[in-house]
Image (cartoon, helix red, strand yellow):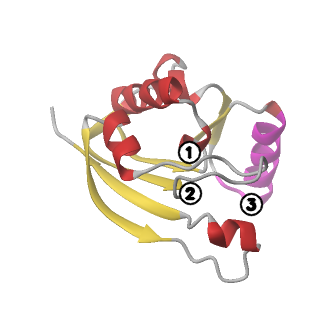
Amino acid sequence: MTGVDIVKKAVRSAERRAETAGVDARFVVGDVTAVDQLGLGRAFDLLIDFSCFHELSDEQRLAAGHAASAVAADAATLLIQVFAPGRRNPMLPRGASREDIELSFTGSTIIDKTAADVSGAPSAVQKAQPCFYRLQRVST
């Protein structure tokens, strides 16, 4: 398992939690828009984006999709959590649509979309309608 985050404090925290849990994992400080340039290797079977994609600019989304495709194995699964697109308070991201994901991950096909369980979440998160898109990388 390899985790990437641009925030050093988040990476250090993840390293401590993994060590405490006895989990063998690698964490790297890096930019998801250039994950293919971090020396992580290639052929990852599963890529997970939890609330990152929907915070990126359009240009960053395209770069992230290209970079993810470069490190994904043929037939890899990509799981992306996003909020529905819309205007919100400044504390929440703008969200992303199916079309946004399709434009950015051209080497993959959306398999399904599932609403996230927001029971017990703050009302702002419930209104943002978070969901998960599951994509399949197209074999090259």
Per the image, label 2 sits on a secondary structure element best described as: loop
Q: Quadrant of residue 43?
A: top left
Distance, label 2 to label 3, CA atoms, is 30 Å
> Where does the C terminus fall, quadrant-wise?
top left
- Marks 2,1: beta carbons within 8 A: yes
Query: Mark 1 or mark 3, which has the lower sequence index?
Result: 3
Residue 102 position in % (x across, y down): 31, 42
Asked if one can make out residue 40 in the rendered structure from this viewpoint, the answer is: no
Distance, label 2 to label 1, CA atoms, is 7 Å
Q: Amino acid at mark 3?
A: Ala
* Above or below, comparing residue 85 to residue 103 in the picture: below
Residue 44 position in % (x across, y down): 39, 39
Per the image, label 3 sits on a secondary structure element best described as: helix
Asked if one can make out residue 98 in the rendered structure from this viewpoint, the answer is: yes
Label 3: how many residues lie within 10 Å, few (<14), some (14-19) or many (20+)? few
First to last magenta residue range: 9-23
Which residue bears the numbered disc 1?
54
The furthest residue to the bottom:
119
| 2 or 3: mark nearer the eye | 2
Q: Quadrant of residue 88?
A: bottom right
Q: Is residue 73 left or right of residue 64?
A: left
Q: Amino acid at mark 2?
A: Phe
Identify the residue at image location x=61%, y=63%: 128
